[in-house]
Image: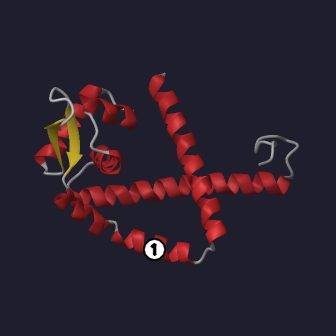
Amino acid sequence: MGSISSTDSRAPRGRRQLTSSIKQSLRALSIQLSLLNHQVGARAGLNDVDLDCLDLVNRYGPLSPSALAERAALHPATLTGILDRLERGGWVVRERSPSDRRAVLVRALRDRNAELVRLYSGMNSSMTEICARYGDAELELLADFLRRTVDAGRSATEKLAGD
C-alpha cells in the first residue's frame, strides 16, 4: 500500500481520480443498499432501524441488549422500543442467558427470518453472478478492501456516536 493519501497534491492525477471514483461508487452503493433495505423493510413491516438491529442480531447474536445497543450505536432506551417492536412482530425473542440467569439475550427467530432471505434473494443472486466473473485473487482483494472499508465505517460511526 502506498503512503500517498488521496488528498495529497503530490499524488498522480490518475490515482486521485481513481480514488475519488471509488469513494463515489461506495457512496452510491451505500445509497442503493439503503433503498433496497427500505423496500425489504417495508415489505416485512419493519422500519429501517428495526431492520438494521435485526440484521445485527442475525449476524452476531444472540446478543445482550447492551451489546446490541453498542453495536448499533444506539441509546439503550431507544433500543428497548426497537426490541419491543421486533418481539411483537415475531422477529426476535428475549430469553435468559443459560450461563447467567440474570442476564437477557436477544435471539433472532429463524422461521420468521426466512421471509427476509426471500426478499433479499434477488440481490444475493446478482452478487453470486457478479462474483463468478472474478478470479480467486481478485475476490480476495475485494474482500479485503470491503472488510477494511467496513472497519473504517465502524470506526467513524463509533467516533460520531461518542461525540
Tell me the residue at 81%/42% (across/down).
Answer: 3
Tell me the residue at 64%/51% (across/down).
Answer: 23
- Determine crowd level at label 1: few under 14, some 14-19, many 20+ residues with C-alpha closer than 10 A: few
The colour scheme applied to this rendered structure is: secondary structure
Label 1: element kind: helix
Q: Which residue is mark 1?
A: 126
From this view, report whether residue 81 is shown above or below residue 54.
above
Three-letter amino acid code of the residue under disc 1: Ser
Q: Quadrant of residue 74?
A: top left
What is the residue that sits farthest to the left in this orientation? 88
Tell me the residue at 57%/41% (across/down).
Answer: 152
Please tell me which residue lies in front, 111 or 23. 111
Residue 57 % position (x, y)? 30, 46
From this view, report whether residue 156 is shown above or below residue 51.
above
Q: Quadrant of residue 131?
A: bottom right
Residue 77 % position (x, y)? 24, 26
What is the residue that sits farthest to the top in this orientation? 163
Residue 32 % position (x, y)? 46, 59
Q: Is residue 139 left or right of residue 2?
A: left
From this view, report whether residue 110 is shown above or below residue 148.
below
